[in-house]
Amino acid sequence: MIKPVIKPRIVAIFHQKGGVGKTTTTLNLAATLAGMQQPVLMIDLDPAGNLTSGIGLKISKVRQSIADVLVGSETLESVIQPTGIPFLSIIPSNLELMSAVKLLTLRSRHERLLRKSIDLPQLGPQMRRSPVSLLKWILIDCPPSGLPLIMQALVASDLLLTPLRCEYYALQSLELVFGLIREVRMKFNPSLDFRMLINAFVKRGKLQTMILEQLRNFYGEYMFNTMISNNSKVGYSQVEGKSVLSYAPKAVVTEQYQSLAQELMDFFVSKNNNY
C-alpha cells in the first residue's frame, strides 16, 4: 500500500504596512524550524528581494527565481536553491518579478498559479521523493503592496501570519488585511487561517503596552502567545546575512523564535491537519 504524500504546511507572512518585520519573521522562523530538523522552503515573493539578500544571495546574480515559476517557464522544484543551512532552502526573487506581475494581470484565473505549482509535484507516485514532497513547511515572504503577488500567496496558504508592531499606524492598517482575508476566503481559499505576531515589542514602552492591551481585548483569539522583543541582535544578524539563530544562538530573541516555532507546530496539530 502506497502511503499518501503529506503536504507541507504553507504560511504566508504578510501585512499591508511596510517595516513591521515580515522578512525578518520569515527568515528567523524558517531557520528555527529548520534547526528543529523540519525541512523548510522559503519563497521570496517580494520584488525587493530582501529575503534573498538576507540569506546571503546576491540578487543581481540570481538567474532563476519565483518569477520564472509564475510565468510558467520553470517548475517550482527547478528553482529551489540551498541556503547553506541544513533543512532550509529558498526560491529567490529578482527584478524579473516586476515583469511577471504585469503578465499575471493579463491572465484569467491567475490567482491559483502558485498553489498549482506547489501541488503539481505531489500528483504521481514517481514524485513522492521529490524535494517538495519532502518538505514540512513552505514560508512565503510577501510584499506590502502588489495585489497579484499577495493573492498568489494567500490563495496558496493554510495560514496568514501577520507581524505587527504595537504602533498606531500598524494597528490602523489591520482592517485592510481583514478585507483581503474575507475576499480570499469567499472566492478562492475558504480554509485560510489567520494569526497575528507581536514583533519588535518594547516592554518598557507605555504606548506599546497600551496598544497591546487593546489588541488582546479585540483580537486575542487570533494572536500568538509568543511575542518577539525589540533586540539589537536581530539587526546585527541582518548585516551578517544570517538568521538570528546562527548569529546569536543563546540570545533571548532566539529563544522567542523557538517558542514561536513550537507554537506554530502546535497550532497545526490542533487543526487536525496532516502534519
Image (cartoon, helix red, strand yellow):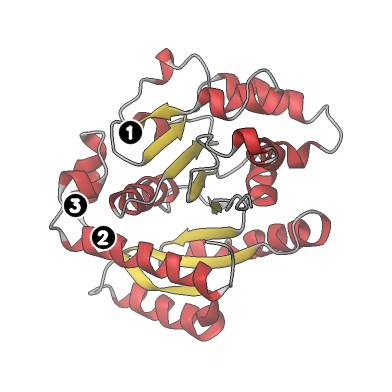
Residue under the image location 55 percent in, 42 percent down: 133
The percent coordinates of residue 250 (x first, y second) are 12, 57
> Within the image, what quadrant is residue 112 found in?
top right
Q: Residues within 10 Å of mark 2 (few under 14, many from 20)?
A: some
Q: CA distance from mark 1 to mark 2?
A: 21 Å
Give the class, few, some or many, for how many residues have Cα within 10 Å of label 3's Cα (few <14, many ≥20): few
From the viewer's perspective, is 123 left or right of 194? right
**Whether residue 167 is visible:** no
The answer to whether 106 appears left or right of 217 in the picture is right
**Vertical order, 191 against 50 (above or below):** below
Q: Position of residue 170 (x, y in %)?
A: 49, 61
Q: Which mark is residue 230?
A: 2
Mark 2: amino acid: Asn
Q: Which residue is mark 3?
A: 232
Spatial CA distance of label 3 from label 2 is 7 Å
Tell me the SS state at disc 2: loop
Q: Is residue 68 above or below residue 137?
A: above
Amino acid type of disc 3?
Answer: Ser
Q: Which residue, given by chain and number where applicable, does mark 1 sit on?
A: 55
Circles 1 and 3, Cβ within 8 Å, touching? The answer is no
